Image: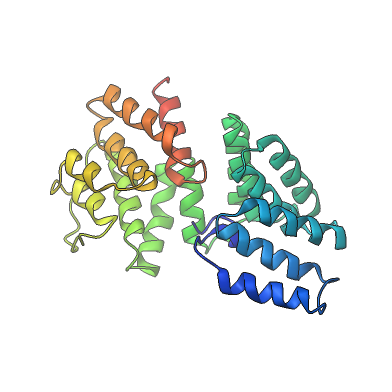
Amino acid sequence: MPDRHFAVRNRGVYAAEIAAYTKVLRAGQAKRRAHVYFGRGNAYLASGRPKLALLDYAFALKLDPKLADVLALRGEALVALGRHEKALAELDKAVQIAPGNAEIAGSRAIARLVLGRLDDADAEWRRQLELLPVDNAPARACVLLRLADYAASVPPLERACQGEPADLYWRLYLRTARARLDGVPAPADGAAVPSTWPGPLLALHAGRSSPDEVLARADNPVRRAEALFQLGVLAVAGAAERARQHWGQLIEIAPPVMVEHAAARHELRRLGA
């Protein structure tokens, strides 16, 4: 999501990038350049190999211990490995070096969330909002959704929809926010709903798909978490216990980096769970 650190926004296989960095290091051209280790560490992290990322971040920090972004991404790798207290310590160091870095604030919020410190995470997300440029609507919308602050999220979501009309998630999240504010599904916007994900979630909001059909299409843990969140949104006004069940299941399977994970924790708190 656009509120996250640049090195963890996209996941994939970065074999070519890793090979290129390795070639440079083996040639001895950049063994004293921290950014080469940092770049390869980022490629490892984005490839789902946090242990290797940690090794490269350690080399980078030996060359320059005050690189805030390296400390922050080291924290991200530690979160991925379940070493949450250590991750938060690294992120605390990063914030001391770069207190005005909005992405580092967001990373620290997630580390606090994982440790069960929701109020502390919220304070960090509010700080991130203060640091984010007012014209960065996508990032601001994501932070506000994590906080489940639906009223405040609508204006940046509208701008995100205008700026990236092909991104179905902005349409989905805007309908989500309006549904939570109005207590009923938002009126259909008339736009076409594709069959590809997250199209089924838009169809659910429009009454064109059933919960069972949506869950059948949710073919991995992330999609199932997204589906459970939307089912909770559509159920909470008339069936709070059902919404509680959906959001409780989401917490069990959703990675804490997901917008829906943080939002569901706030929803459950509102329901007294």
Q: Is residue 255 left or right of residue 113?
A: left
Work out whether residue 219 or residue 95 is closer to the camera in this orientation and state it: 219
Work out whether residue 60 or residue 265 is closer to the camera in this orientation and state it: 60
Q: Hey, which quadrant is residue 170 in on the image?
A: bottom left
Q: In this rendering, does residue 148 appear at all?
A: no
Measured from the top left, where is residue 252 in percent x and y?
A: 43, 32
Q: Is residue 85 left or right of residue 165?
A: right
List the single residue furthest toward the left: 208
- Residue shown at 49%/63% (left/top)? 12
Q: Is residue 16 above or below residue 99?
A: below
Q: Is residue 244 above or below residue 51?
A: above
Q: Which scheme is used to colour this image of the protein?
A: rainbow
- Residue shown at 41%/27% (left/top)? 268
Quadrant (top left/top right/bottom left/bottom right) for the C terminus: top left
Measured from the top left, where is residue 262 in percent x and y?
A: 48, 39
- Residue shown at 39%/28% (left/top)? 248
Q: What is the number of callouts on the image?
A: 0
Measured from the top left, where is residue 259 in percent x and y?
A: 46, 46
Measured from the top left, where is residue 196 in percent x and y?
A: 25, 60
Q: In this rendering, does residue 43 appear at all?
A: yes
List the single residue furthest toward the front: 26
Q: Is residue 63 above or below residue 22?
A: above
- Residue shown at 69%/42% (left/top)? 87
Q: Is residue 170 left or right of residue 36?
A: left
Q: Hey, which quadrant is residue 253 in on the image?
A: top left
Work out whether residue 52 or residue 198 is closer to the camera in this orientation and state it: 52
Q: Hey, which quadrant is residue 232 in on the image?
A: top left
